[in-house]
Amino acid sequence: MRIRNFRWGLAALGALTLLTGCWDRRELNELSIVAGMGLDAKDERIQVSVQIVNPSEVAAKNGGGKFSPPVTTMKVAEKTTVEALRKLTVVSPRRIYTSHLRILVIGEQLARQGIIKVMDGISRNREIRSDFYLIVAKDATAEEVLEILTPIEKIPANKLFNTLEISEKLWAPTVKIQLDRFVSDLTNPTRDPVLTGIEITGEAKKGETEKNTERVYPYSNLKYSGVALFKGDKLVGWLTDEESKGYNYIMGKVKNSAGRLACPSGDGVIGVEIIRTQSEVSGKVVGGKPEIRIDLVVEEDIGEVQCDVDLLKPETIEKLERRSNEKIKQIMESAIRKAKENRTDIFGFGDAIEDANPAAWQDLKKEWDSYFANLDVTIQVDARFRRYGTTTQPLVKE
């Protein structure tokens, strides 16, 4: 028994000698944690801006004291993003740590020049996870966006991340695009990429100061606006908010939203809430000509009535449903029209044609830009009202 125990002891001791410590550990006080990153064109180089969290300022504090910003922005320009991220060490007292990246902002100038080479460096970086969102700075640089201080959310990158998630769920003109999907669309010959736009409202310079976070109504704010259209890896145009909503209807990504319809009497409006949508895109080739059909089912609630109308009459609801069908169809058509003008197949219509007729697609794909610009698209919308709120008749009528 003693011999056996002795052998077990030697085995355990041998196993302990094989165990190593955390040889590659990184202490928090040795890292500069990056929450936001920006990419801009700078002469013939790439400027990388990083928004670094100041942990001591983000944590809740008691008492007064001199203001210190919750984040610090640093920037460096180099020929590659790899060099720029390493070169940031000449201005940062700590190692740049990008694993907690929340938002990547691309400057409009860089987006128009082309971003495929830059995205290669981002997607290849093993420290950067792919669960952050990509957006395009509209009429601004990424650096300028990252310098705006925001109220409520102390870390502006978190504000951008959370606002995009909420807006996509409840309003619909925005799109959440993460790295993997964007790279996939960039390299997909049958689909062009899109990214949500971000713009600076108000007085940008004052937005960089602490006073911006002390006012009830900030001097400047960051607002999502429109969707950027890419042809390949180059930004070629913008969808308006309404056209962006049309894009999301086509893609079946409208989870919740709101809109309005004209009252049957022509005086006043009715507010509606979209609570559920389901979209199906199908393609076919007839006589060598591609055709697309979109079937959209929409469930809506009556949210607000500003006119004298009898909601208990079936003919009233039927009339409102017809108007809703027409309006949603117009919104979808506006998105398709803008995409055709820019010859950007952001909807993946090419995918639908290839799925329907792979043999015909081999010929069509050679001149798909021309076919897409003249594509015959049929839209069928079936909108139904499900609920009328807590009151059946409008207060105006009562």
Image: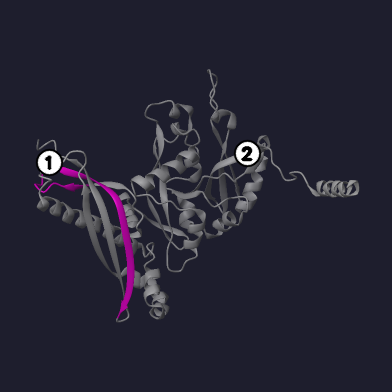
- Callout 1: helix, strand or loop? loop
Residue type of the residue flagged with mark 1: Cys
Q: Residues within 10 Å of mark 2 (few under 14, many from 20)?
A: many
Residue 107 location, x and y as percent? 48, 49
- Callout 2: helix, strand or loop? strand
Residue 161 location, x and y as percent? 46, 43
Q: What stretch is highlighted in magenta?
A: 260-286
Is 186 situated left or right of 391 in this image? right
Residue 132 location, x and y as percent? 51, 48
Q: Is the magenta stretch mostly helix, strand or loop?
A: strand
Q: Of label 1 and label 2, which has the lower sequence position?
A: 2
Residue type of the residue flagged with mark 2: Ser
Q: Which mark is residue 93?
A: none
Residue 92 location, x and y as percent? 65, 38
Residue occupied by mark 1: 307
Q: In terms of depth relative to the viewer, which is nearer, 168 or 106? A: 168
Q: Which residue is drawn at 58% across and 52% down?
A: 45
